[in-house]
Structures are given as C-alpha cells and as structure tokens.
Image (spheres, rainbow, N blue to C red):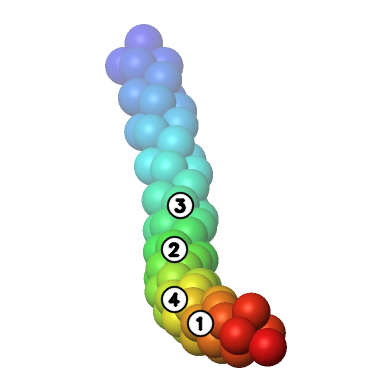
Amino acid sequence: MSFEVFEKLEAKVQQAIDTITLLQMEIEELKEQNNNLNQQVQQAAGNSESVVRENQHLKEEQLVWQERLRALLGKMEEV
C-alpha cells in the first residue's frame, strides 16, 4: 500500500518537473521575443527621429523656395 502511495507521489513529482521544464522553456522564448520587440522599438524610434529631421529639412527647403518664388514674382510685377 505504501508502495502505491510512493508511486503516485513519484508521478506527481515527475509531472511537476515536466511542468516546470516547459514553463522555463516558455520563459526563455518570451525573453527572446521581448528582446526582439525591444530592438524593433529602438529601430522604430531611430527611424522616427530620422523622419522628423528629414521633415524639418524639407519644410525649411520649402520656405526657401517660397521666398525665392515670391522674389521672382515681385520682380515680374515690377516689369
């Protein structure tokens, strides 16, 4: 009778070990996914900064062209 109890206990211990092993594997997978997502976030932030800088540059360029166009139109009106 105590042998049966020992076998049941051993089965439960083995089941617990298997569950812990699976959970550890899942944790490692989630850590890897988390690292990948963090890298993607950093890349997106870098890309965002680049786009903002480019946008600012284009706005400044647009203002320069507008001023040049206004100057040309002013000269044409004088003629």
N-terminal-most mark, 3 or 4: 3
Direction from residue 76 to residue 30 in the image, left or right: left
- Tell me if label 3 and label 4 are in contact, CB under 8 Å: no
Q: Which residue is mark 4?
A: 56
Q: Amino acid at mark 1?
A: Glu
Q: CA distance from mark 3 to mark 4?
A: 39 Å
Which element carries disc 3, helix, strand or loop?
A: helix
Q: Which residue is mark 2?
A: 41
Residue 26 visible in the picture:
yes
Circle 3 packing at 10 Å, graded few (<14), some (14-19), many (20+), is few
Disc number lying in front (3 or 2): 2
- Tell me if label 1 and label 3 are in contact, CB under 8 Å: no
Q: Which residue is mark 3?
A: 30
N-terminal-most mark, 1 or 3: 3
Q: Looking at this view, is 5 or 54 the one in front?
A: 54
Q: Which residue is mark 1?
A: 67
- Tell me if label 3 and label 2 are in contact, CB under 8 Å: no
N-terminal-most mark, 4 or 2: 2
**Quadrant occupied by the C terminus:** bottom right
Which element carries disc 4, helix, strand or loop?
A: helix
N-terminal-most mark, 4 or 1: 4
Which element carries disc 1, helix, strand or loop?
A: helix
Q: Amino acid at mark 4?
A: Gln
Residue at point 57%, 82% (across, down): 74
Q: Amino acid at mark 2?
A: Val
Residue at point 64%, 79% (across, down): 77
Disc number lying in front (4 or 1): 1
Q: Looking at this view, is 78 or 55 the one in front?
A: 78
Q: Amino acid at mark 3?
A: Leu
